[in-house]
Image: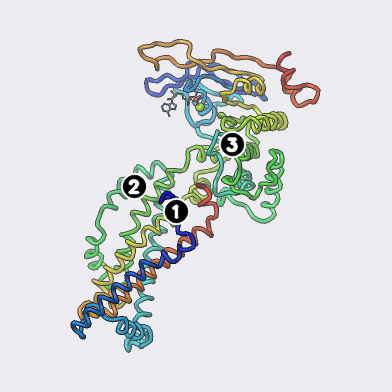
Amino acid sequence: MSYLQIRNVWKTYGDNVVLEKINLTIAQGEFCTLIGPSGCGKSTFLRMLMGQDTPSKGSILLDGKPISNEPDSDRGVVFQKYALFPHLKALENVMLGLEMEKSPLLGKVFGATRRKMKAEAMEMLESVGLAHSADKYPSELSGGMQQRLSIAQALVKKPKILLLDEPFGALDPGSKADMHVLVQGLWKKYGLTIFMVTHDVKEAFELGTRLLVFDKVRNDPHSPNAFGAIIVNDIKLDKNKQKNMGEDHVGINETISE
Amino acid sequence: MRLINLDAGRFSPLLKILPFVILGLIYWIAADARHAANPDDKLLPTFEVIADAVVMMTTEVDELTEEPILFTDTVASLKRIGEGLGISVIIGLFFGIIQGTLPIVRSLLSPFSAAISLIPPIAILPILLIIFGLEEPAKVALIVIGVTPFLIRDTQQRALEIPEELLIKVQTLGASTWQIILRVVLPHVLPRLLDALRLSLGAAWLFLITAEAIASSEGLGYRIFLMRRYMEMDVIFPYVIWITFLAYMMDLMLAILIRKAFPWYRKEK
Ligand SMILES: Nc1ncnc2c1ncn2[C@@H]1O[C@H](COP(=O)(O)OP(=O)(O)OP(=O)(O)O)[C@@H](O)[C@H]1O
Ligand SMILES: [Mg+2]
């Protein structure tokens, strides 16, 4: 059950204590949504899960082993922006991860291997509804399309954990709703373990199976950086959501009000 | 209507050639005036004299090389500048990328290449002449020394400006350092390097002409400085225009290359 273990993790930047004694045990397939005031360390937390940053104290274990301290393909990521390679068309953006696995020397494959890979990437593009835009450059896509492409790009590597940092923050309500359906579907289909930071409380409740609320509880007015944020609330949203979601007769709202 | 919202419309092509026409006219009037005062004036040769000189330099075979001098000079100069810029691009790309991508190499080489780039290349010319004599490498080397430090520094900067998110992302896709350089850094840096190369063309021609003026027996710069001794303005003027034209064409070709080879580059912004 304890797929990801976060043991007494602290993060400080100089004198600035950002996070304090974070302890968490996350099961495989959990969809954690993270909320909290701006600057409280949510992105910092994700960066540590990703290996982009290391805890100042404490440890993070994945499957019982300490996680690697640089980003790797165990952990996929989707940022709010800047997540796509501008020189590659949509399909090539998705293929990139596959190509680099197959071809250590050139990072590019040719011939039959390429055709097979293209088919696989195309399937991924289809599942995020971008098949018709396969030949477009990222700059030619709308914000929502770019974000869907970014998700496809991360998922094609079949990561154990998917980290999303305000992925839909810049989207209009319509595309946001589409993205919710998409992410829910992919989460179930691939059995992903997801961490998603959001400022949208409704989104956090609707999507997650577990809601983590970050905030500072102690505050010293004379040195505002002396205390860090902790997880003030750890809410199990609905154990059955994974099973219920997407089935026609059970709507999202019903599930939550149970 | 505000001036900032007013464009030339269909008069645009006309406006573009206007300054050239005016310059030609001024020259024509000035040359005419000087010849009225002194028919043997050499400072501002008339268009007829210049035309004669152009015919001479493009058709009359030089006894030494058995080619017209403009042809010999152009081939010699283009070869030098081509080699010089080619070598500069390769060195600039290599060091720019490793300095921009690998923090260890950056610590090692970045201050060094910044210092090197402050050496005035012309001050090195005597050293080059001592080492290479009047042979070709001296001229090519001056261009390389003059242009490469800028290309290295610019390329390093371009590599450093790749958004961190992209570098994180590609690592989560499982890329090694080598693959990151090949698939992310190189494509990002290449069109920008060619842009930097366009900006370097002026400097490259400057160094080429300097080197040719001092140590050469053919080449566009050599010819201009040779003709100076005899005050042969009728040769110097067309040569200067020809050099300008060549530089312009190189710039234009690079611009077209960037557009054709990197279609995503201009869209990105
Ligand atoms: N590299 C760094 N060096 C120093 N301080 C940092 C660094 N990264 C983050 N911080 C500090 O850590 C704190 C938390 O930042 P973080 O980006 O994690 O907040 P956040 O919860 O994601 O906020 P937001 O909701 O606005 O995105 C901030 O006070 C920030 O100044
Ligand atoms: Mg953040």
Residue in the picture at 45% in, 16% down: A228
Tell me, yes or no, whether the two marked residues, 2 and 1, touch with CB atoms within 8 Å: no
Q: Which amino acid, mark 2?
A: Leu
Identify the mark at residue B109; answer none if there is no mark: 2
Residue in the picture at 34% in, 62% down: B202
Q: Chain letter for mark 1, please.
A: B
Answer yes or no: is residue A191 visible.
no
Q: Which quadrant is the N terminus of chain A positioned in?
A: top right
The image's colour scheme reads rainbow
- Among the 4 quarters of the image, the one containing residue B200: bottom left
Above or below residue B184? Residue A83 is above
The residue wearing badge 1 is B6
Above or below residue B205? Residue B75 is below
Disc 3/disc 1 C-alpha distance (Å) = 54 Å
Disc 1 element: loop
- Classify residue B108 as left or right of residue A116: left
Viewer-side label of 2, 1:
1
Above or below residue B235? Residue B253 is above
Frontmost residue, B38 versus A143: B38
Q: Which amino acid, mark 1?
A: Leu
The residue wearing badge 3 is A73
Q: Would you call the spot at circle 1 few (<14 residues within 10 Å), some (14-19), or many (20 or more)?
A: few
Q: Earlier in the sequence, mark 2 or mark 1?
A: 1
Q: Chain letter for mark 3, please.
A: A
Q: Which amino acid, mark 3?
A: Ser
Q: Are marks 3 and 2 on the same chain?
A: no
Q: Are marks 2 and 1 on the same chain?
A: yes
Disc 3 element: loop
Answer yes or no: is residue A201 visible.
yes
Q: Position of residue B186 (x, y in %)?
A: 49, 51
